[in-house]
Image: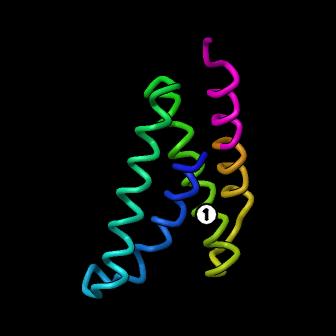
Amino acid sequence: MAAGLVEIAWAQSIRPTDNFTRPLPTLICFVLGVAAVYLLSRAMNGLPVGTSYAVFTGIGAVGAIALGVAVHQDPLSAGRLAALSLILGGIVLARLTEPG
């Protein structure tokens, strides 16, 4: 969960780098990216790689879209809502059906 949350912050940190031309935002972006991957590697200690990565990317995708809508007024359509629902359903299903 922590890895997914940091991935959301990382995704949001990319735009302020202005194509990696601004030093401080670029440094923040790289630190968040490393932190997200580190936390993902920790999650893989207790979960299979596939489940860990699916949950990580799913949380990141849903969070990035939600923040885009809430903060940047990105458009939200029925299709995007359906896609978010499928992603969330996939995350829950992957986690609930994990053996052991």
Q: Which image quadrant: the C terminus? A: top right
Q: Is residue 98 left or right of residue 50?
A: right
Type of the residue with mark 1: Ile
Q: Is residue 44 left or right of residue 58?
A: left
Residue 25 x/y as whole percent: 37, 82
- Span shown in magenta: 88-100
Residue at screen point 52% across, 25% down: 47
Residue at screen point 70% across, 33% down: 92
Which one is in front, 90 or 95?
Answer: 95
SS at badge 1: helix
Q: Which residue is farthest bottom? A: 22
Which one is in front, 84 or 23?
Answer: 23
Q: Which image quadrant: the N terminus? A: top right
**15 w.r.t. 89: above or below:** below
Task: Give the total number of marks visible in the rendering.
Answer: 1
The residue beneath circle 1 is 65
Residue at screen point 71% across, 49% down: 82
Residue at screen point 43% across, 28% down: 49
In the picture, residue 29 is in which quadrant? bottom left
Please name the predominant secondary structure of the magenta segment in the image: helix
